[in-house]
Amino acid sequence: MPPVFPPGYDKLNMKNQEPLKPIKPNLQLVQKAEDFKSQAYLLHPVVDPLMMGGLSLVFFVAMHFFVDPSASTYKLSWVMFVMSMVVNFPHFMASYVLMYRDYRKEILSNWKFTWAGLIAPVALGTSMAAFTYYSVSTGSHKTLGYLPSLMYLLVGHHYVKQIYGCVMVSSAKAKFYFSPLESKALWVTMYSVWMMSFLSFNSYTVNTHNFYGISYSTLGLGKIWLTLVNLATAVSVVAFLATMVKRYVTDGRIMPLSAWTAIVSIFVWYIPSFYHQHYFYMIPFFHSLQYLLFSSVFAKNKALDLSRVHEDGPRQRASFLKNLGTFFGLTIVTGLLAWHYIPSHLDSLGLVSNVLGPTFFMFSFQIFLNIHHYIMDNVLWRKENLQIKKYL
């Protein structure tokens, strides 16, 4: 019977009676998979600040200095629609891929994921169906008009929470850790900016707007509310900057550039006096870039980690590309289907009452996906989630 050698050992060394030595596989990807948490950046030291808001600051300056605010937005709106196919749509669907693929086991074992992955979408869909039935019954879509207002309120909160996450994660990667006071000061600043944006849109007079054929009205709140929130924003900004100055004086540390660009970007996106109708069309694109930075890094690091099961380099690289390609492929394909082709096709069939208008399905898909995306993200991107801790 021939001798049995332990797996991974070179039996050729037996000819010279040398000690058995393990065969060393190509560890290029394995080493990267083990080292990504120690990096001072997420994707790249230059790419990080650009995707977290730096690129939006460049375009903010370009728009305000070189583009006439009164010029037509027709061409730009089409450009941003095309860009939506490769950035905005995938950013939404990345949360679905993470929820129903990467965290699928938690949906039935963790209450928070059960809520976000099962209960919330059913409740949201049922509520929207009830609103639709009531609108058709009464011959008015006034009830449906509350949904865009709710969506914009939640989207505003989602934006500032994402900025907060950008600051926390990028700072932690650079070994800059916030004290409880500094963290609270940043939170107050973000919340005040959110309220300033929301109230500026809903103050003074009641205005009627149209969202894919469904009209909705602003709240028409008194001027005093906007004055108070503007004051709160100014005070909170000064307070947060004071904590950063104190931190520099105390230990000579400052936040990394990527964190600062994220903070500054939310101000140029949300402060009403910085409004530019061309730039306004681009803000969702820049927000989506922020989100894709984190979801892409998560997918990349997980793909690297999964490739470790293979010992030889070619199989590692093939596994890495397969897993990463699957993630991006799913976000792009499902994004095009859910955000464009399916609702557009349903609208073309004329299946609903004339009361709801010709683009009712586009309206419904937009509302549902925006709100559900917000609910899922409140569960997915938490530091206590094991995969987030491991891959970010």
Image: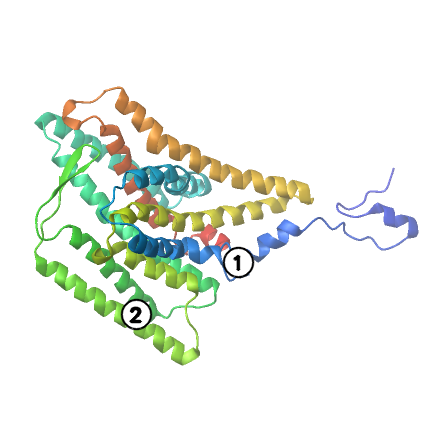
**Residue placed most toward the observer, 231 or 184:** 231
The label number, if any, that marks residue 37 in the structure image = 1
Crowding at dot 2, Cα within 10 Å, few <14 / some 14-19 / many 20+, comes out as many
Q: How is the image coloured?
A: rainbow
Crowding at dot 1, Cα within 10 Å, few <14 / some 14-19 / many 20+, comes out as some
Q: Is residue 169 left or right of residue 115?
A: right
Q: What residue sits 14% from the left and 50% below the top? A: 202
Q: Is residue 188 left or right of residue 81?
A: left
Residue under label 2? 240
**Residue placed most toward the observer, 60 or 195:** 60
**Residue placed most toward the observer, 119 or 86:** 86
x then y, percent, for residue 79: 35, 39
Compared to residue 328, the image places residue 191 above or below, namely below
Which quadrant: the N terminus?
top right
Q: Is residue 193 left or right of residue 90?
A: left
Mark whose residue sits in front, 2 or 1: 2
Q: What residue sits 51% from the left and 37% below the top? A: 326
Compared to residue 385, the image places residue 145 above or below, namely above
Residues marked 2 and 1 touching at CB (< 8 Å): no
x then y, percent, for residue 321: 57, 40
Secondary element at image label 2: helix
x then y, percent, for residue 30: 63, 51
- Give the amino acid type for the residue marked by disc 1 in the picture: Lys
x then y, percent, for residue 114: 35, 42
Mark 2–mark 1 distance (CA, rounded to whole Å): 28 Å
Quarter where residue 167 is shown: bottom left
Q: Earlier along the polypeptide chain: callout 2 or callout 1?
A: 1
